[in-house]
Image: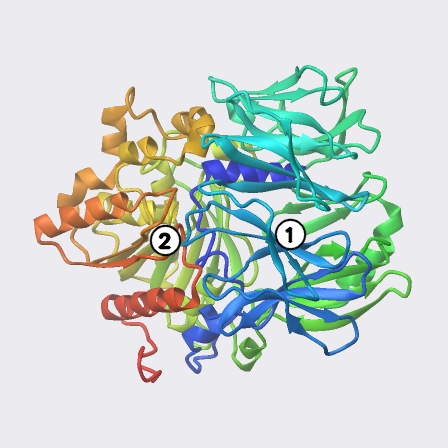
Amino acid sequence: MYQMYRRLVALTLVLSLVAGLALVLTSCGSREARLIPRDVLFGNPERMRARLSPDGGKLAYIAPSNDVLNVWVRTVGESDDKAVTHDDNRGIFMYFWAQDGENIMYIQDADGDENWLLYSVDIETGDVTALTPFENVQVRILDYSKHHPNTMVIAMNQQDPRLHDVYRLDLATGELTMAARNPGNIVGWLTDFDLNVRGAVAMNPEGGMDLVVRESEDSVWEKLLTWGPDDVMTSGPYGFSKDGKRMYLVDSRDVNAGRLVELDIATGDTKVIAEDPTYDIDDVMLNPDTYEVEAVSFVRDRREWVVLDDAIADDFEAISALDEGEYGVYSRDNADGTWLVAFTKDDGPVAYYSFDRASGEGTFLFSHRPDLENYDLAKMEPFSFEARDGLTVHGYVTYPVGIPREGLPLVLNVHGGPWVRDNWGYNPEAQWLANRGYVSMQVNYRGSTGYGKNFVIAADREWGGKMHDDLVDAVGWAVDRGVADPERVAIYGASYGGYAALVGATFTPDLFSCAVAAMGPSDLITFLNTVPPYWESTLPIMYRRIGHPEEDAEFLKSRSPLYKVDQIQIPMLIVHGANDPRVKQAESEQIVAALEEKGLEYEYLLFEDEGHGFVKPENRLEFYAATEEFLATHLGGRFEAAAAGADK
């Protein structure tokens, strides 16, 4: 399953903001304009992430219970909503239905340590069962199926913190049985129709990936193909066909962009199913019974679906007429008669619909933040420019509503990763910044995924180099058009975006008026030497993309903000979560110590109960309040006073 696999590899490679800054879904804007309260933007949503029960008779969703996000369930067509989980700390964000329709499964970590464990809750009694009651273990969900309702396949690093082995979980008895042992280089696993572990992706020392398969769980592994280092970010297995004789791959070998192909396992022959010369395949929709491809999507400026199975063509046409914005099918009942569809807009909340395939009619369920509808939200506009070396770079800009687009303060909001991308659609930070009077600029600088492998390769060993040049050139684009005031530009970001903000303050201090750096590496050597143990098998890729901490020590120092602190001339806001397993707290502590020693202006926020992002709403709100006042002080925008809530 390519999406599941890609998230696994990205999770181990990507330094993205997974909670708080990226995990909170909202939508907002302004008309110049009432100030939109931070709580409306960054507090808990009213409801989100709806899922249908296997029989289609119940609807689950995430909503606050005593101000903490929990899973709720209601009977379809009724108003008998009730919370079925009762977490009172960090909340629940990832859940799914068990096939019996009587239990909800969810995963949860402790204070951001990313040691996710698997739980089951009986929706009638509320009894919670810890299915993986282990300490310092990370669980990853690999597969579950309506065709095998009592079985789930998971991966855990219980035997070795560096490696995830595969286990088959009997949901009736709770028994765990190892299905595949990780030899030391496996970063992704695949199951077939019968939930047998028959495929895996192994890292090789050159930074490439080998796809290995086996006939059965008793057979030996055989290498089927190899993706070289240039293809690893734009290739990977999606899954097996129903008969297990074919595999679906996203494959960029011999082309630029990852295309969807069908591979005959016995002969090695491939057939192209869908492709684009510039944009990678983003998502694949398989029929849950036949396992044949029904539709694929590409994310260009916006997500675009391509229907490949005529049997769902009328469904997609009817769905597209239900609402505006981008849509996706997020849940299907076992009979495949009812779909749950969500629409994402750039200037409004996420809207959920139930779609009846027989009648072709959709029923509105709810929006995730209805309070947003009380405010005028800004549009998110795609833009592109030519970087100084001729590369075309894309991004999105969100302008304040109702005021002239000239001479405005600008906030360059740099996404994490770096091997992800910004997308069109509701973005709470873009709306927040625009509402406060700033031009919000999001740039898919080189290295961002989705634009083909050549765009990713262009970022190799360019942390703090050409990747930063792209950000600088984007600011130049806005200044040259007169929309941005060159004397009022901030750089802001988390994870890789936090690193970029530190680079902005040290490498190009004359360009920016201030910088906000959350969870950003300050020294690439110490960062690479302290990655979580379960990232170790992916280090060949990271060394190729960033540099080797021993072989390239001087080079990495030249790209590390810590060694250029003397060049800082602007105010800094540094933020971190104490339990961050990806970018250790020391990365912020050492830059703060250097700032203190040099007598430079800075503020430092440390959240003791957070990891790589801000999950708790009180922490999110504290962070955004501090950032909002910091930006207002140095750029002149508006802010909502923390205590009284008065506009300023």
Residue at the (57%, 73%) spot, across then down: 46
Residue 488 vertical position relative to residue 386 in the rendered view, above or below: below
What's the coloring here? Answer: rainbow
Q: Is residue 596 visible?
A: yes
The kind of secondary structure element at disc 2 is: strand
Q: Quadrant of residue 390?
A: top left
In this image, 598 relative to 268: left or right?
A: left
**Which residue occupies 26% across, 66% down?**
630
Q: Give left or right: position of 3 versus 293.
A: left
> Identity of the amino acid at label 2?
Gly
On residue 493, which mark appears? 2
User: How many angstroms separate mark 1 from mark 2 (CA)?
Assistant: 24 Å
Rendering quarter of residue 523: top left
The residue at the point 59 percent across, 64 percent down is: 85
Number of the label disc, if any, that sits on residue 73: none
Q: What residue is disc 1 on?
A: 303
Quick one: quadrant of the N terminus?
A: top right
Residue 42, percent from left and from top: 45, 68
Q: What amino acid type should be assigned to the residue bearing mark 1? A: Arg
Whether residue 281 is visible = no
- Tell me the element at label 1: strand
Residue closest to the eye, 236 or 258:
236
- Against 540, residue 325 (above or below) is below
Indicate left or right for 150 with 539 as reference.
Answer: right
Chain-order first, disc 1 or disc 2: 1
Task: Please tell me which residue lies in front, 253 or 574.
Answer: 574
